[in-house]
Amino acid sequence: MSFSFKRGSKLIIDDGTDRYLLKVADFNFSETFIERGYDVSTVHNPVAISNKTYVNAKSNCSFDFEMYFSDNITVEKKVLEWYGFDASGNFPAVNGQLTKKFDVYVDLGAKIVFIDNVVLENLSFKLNPRGILGMSVTARGFTSMMDSIVLPSNGTLYSQGSFTNAYISASVPGIDVSRVAGATLELTRDINWLNNQSVHDAFSGTMFIPEDVVGSNLAVAGNITTIKRGTEEPKYLPDVPVSISLGDYMTVNLGHCNITQRADFGSGVLQSVSDFKLLNSVDSQIII
């Protein structure tokens, strides 16, 4: 089962205490069921002509959505906390932080989609000084329902404010990164759901839904694009800090990165693109 809604969807995060409302631009959802079976044959008819099948397990449902940043940072901070960042903006370091689970309700108007125990997989920041700041989010849960679902009413409901943009500046030792034209930042990690289904459960007729998850291999990479000036040659810089600031709204500090510069002519203007990859999360934060 899959569906996609491009505009007007409301996504509510329920952390068990309070609720957080996101106005999402795009929302895509899909899930599948797992079928098992075996051939049936007899002594008189050794050639199997029928296949007994059972649909007895759900795969992890996956969904993605696009959100914009607003001047009310409470909701945006909650999304970073969901990904595993602590209150100071430090990167997640242990599995318990990598696999923080919240419940999600998606209000589509005529339908409400409920996705239980959701773990965030990827964050893709869109940092364009000429547009609204935002990011794409990929997530996984382990069950969903669409009928007879009621939106939660616990705690306080926090909503986003007015969408915002900001001037982008950057700092990299040894590289001129003035006149920033744009930047990207990608956070990806491996999410594995453990299959605890036994041999006896496999043909029991009971629907199995995986609940235990392990997160690993957090990778952080991106680039900074600047208008190229002069005749400076591209550089390779190992193990240097990278800082990206979005006015007073957000600061990204990456303590240890490898950087490779390259030229880009795609926009009709000669630009210099500094690709970076985080080596480790020491001295690294995303602060809103």
Image: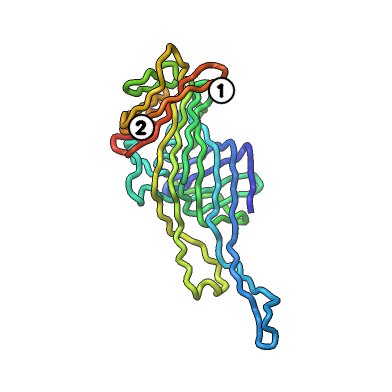
Residue furthest top in the image: 230
Q: Is residue 267 left or right of residue 166?
A: right
Nearer to me, 54 or 39: 39
Percent position of residue 63, x then y: 55, 47
Q: Is residue 7 left or right of residue 169?
A: right
C-alpha span from label 1 to label 2: 24 Å
Q: Residue at x 53, y 56 (%)?
A: 60
Tell me how many marks there are. Answer: 2
- Asked if 178 appears above or below 14 in the picture, the reply is above
The answer to whether residue 77 of the structure is visible from this angle is: yes
- Asked if 261 appears above or below 100 in the picture, the reply is above
Q: Which mark is residue 258?
A: 2
Q: Which mark is residue 181?
A: none
Q: Quick one: quadrant of the C terminus? A: top left
Work out whether mark 1 precedes mark 2 in sequence or the reverse, and give the earlier one.
Answer: 2
Percent position of residue 62, x then y: 54, 50
Q: Which mark is residue 266?
A: 1
